[in-house]
Image: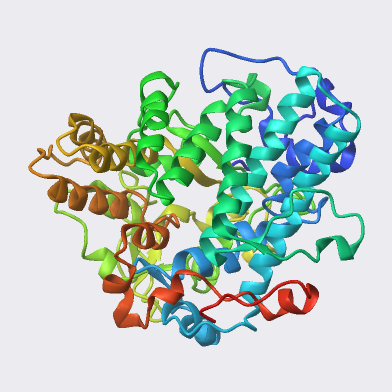
Amino acid sequence: MKISNKKITRFLIAISAIALFGGCKKFLDREPLGIAQIDLNVGALEGKTVGLYGAIRNSAAQPYCGDGFQGIAYVAMNGFRSDDAEIVSDPGASAWHQTYDNFQYTKDDWGAGLYWDKHFIFVGLCNDILDDAAKQNLTDPASVINTAEARFFRAYAYFDLVRTYGAVPKIDFKINVPADGNVAKSDTAAIYALINDDLTFAEQNLPIVWEAKFAGRANKWAAKALHAKVLLQQRRYGEALPICKDIINNGPYQLYTPYWKMFKKEGELCSESIFEIQAAKTAGDGNTYWSRLGQCQGVRGSGTWDLGWGWNTPTTNLVGTYEAGDVRKDATILFSNQSDGGTNTGGYGLTLPNLTNALYWNKKVYNQYSDYLANGLGTPENESQNTWVNQRVLRLSDVLLMGAEAANETGAGNPDAATWVNRVRNRAGLGNVAFVSQAQMRTVIKQERRVEFAMEFERFFDLVRYGDATSVLGTNGYQNKHRYYPIPTSALNANPALVQNPEW
């Protein structure tokens, strides 16, 4: 959360204005994430590449894609479908509740269409950079790094797409005219192969750590962490394990304490953060650096409690899943008509009103009304609601638990599984667990992932990977076919080469 004006450095003046104001602001005046640094010489691709960091949220200077990666389409597809979150706070959103919470998928849902469109627009921005690099034979160090950034982001977008829709068009080239995009679907194996190739290139060519003024740009460790997640989703545990072990043993990351502070201003790009999508909101900035992530999930009330739309609220099921003494519960859940827990849990010493439209709220995006006023933002109605909240995408605790899962699945009794799980549990105020059996450790890891990343859009895809989605979500209407959403009608109409998913 950055609510302050920044001076543009002499280096950035050389970058094109469009890309600059779309993505650079929060790379300035940051502390480095580790010891090693790189001093980037500006290359021909720098402007467009920096623009990717703005386009993935809601940059006003780009064909922004934030609604597909952070807004209500994103939280619906990646959040509502789990047993952790739901949409109940907005009486006008009953159709979304039926579609996503109750698995009554509809091919004409505009949210699903927006998710599809924004992801492919973003893929196109990445491909434009890669096309420039190839046609101009740009092999200087700066251009190679920019190429690696573009491939990291393309992999990031395609990972969302393949997990959400299954087989999708493989567009790894620049579209010059609309007809170029009329591409048939490639099977999931081909899409995962593209993702794996992109991330391998990114791992080999991104810097270990960026120079301080660029802190937050994707580095080698971010590519490795995303690659581990991709491999884990494919259940390629033997390949994911050494990547996780490398990050844990050799990366410049440490678990950040206390847990709640990670989701506040102080926790931006903290010692645990491997990659996050940055956002900012300053009076008079023209909505250039903002994100919908916090706005669409903030407490939905009136007056000083009009903090957002409340479109991703915790479920009673999630609230009841925490162990006694787990500090993550008070850092994750806000309760209507109760204290926000005070400053030792990420609260402000306030008492929520009796907001009868929802019992619980996502505390990981919780800010107070006075933050708007103190920074000249006026009332939330002027689009300022929580729009400065960074999205924590990859962090060390995720790598620890991915590594634990991979270790457990590749070798029953592997001591790393319990060691890594206990690092996460100890930070949460919980005691150690001992390895008893592979099945027992598997249950422990599933529980830890749920409470560690509650409201962070991991749960649905974890359930699918575990093979637990039908048993856990079946009472809400989930069947195996719901692991993939049907191809939106808008996409089918736009691309005559597309065919609907076979189960739809």
Q: Is residue 91 visible?
A: no
Q: Is residue 133 above or below residue 296?
A: above
Q: Position of residue 71 (x, y in %)?
A: 60, 63
Which percent across, then down, holds residue 150? 71, 39
Left or right: residue 478 compared with residue 192: left
Q: What's the image's color scheme?
A: rainbow
Does 115 sit left or right of 284 as displayed?
left
**Residue 369, how many percent across, how many down?**
53, 58
The residue sitting at 60% across, 52% down in the picture is: 190
- At a point 55% along the width and 70% down the height, the residue shown is 309
Number of labels in the image equals 0
Q: Nearer the viewer, residue 266 or 495?
A: 495
Residue drawn at 26 percent across, 72 percent down: 471
Residue 235 spot, x, y in % from top left = 38, 48
* The quadrant where residue 405 appears: top left
Quadrant where the image shows the C terminus: bottom right
Quarter of the image containing the N terminus?
Answer: top right
Relative to residue 255, is residue 418 drawn left or right?
Answer: left
Tell me what residue is drawn at x 61 percent, y 14 percent.
37
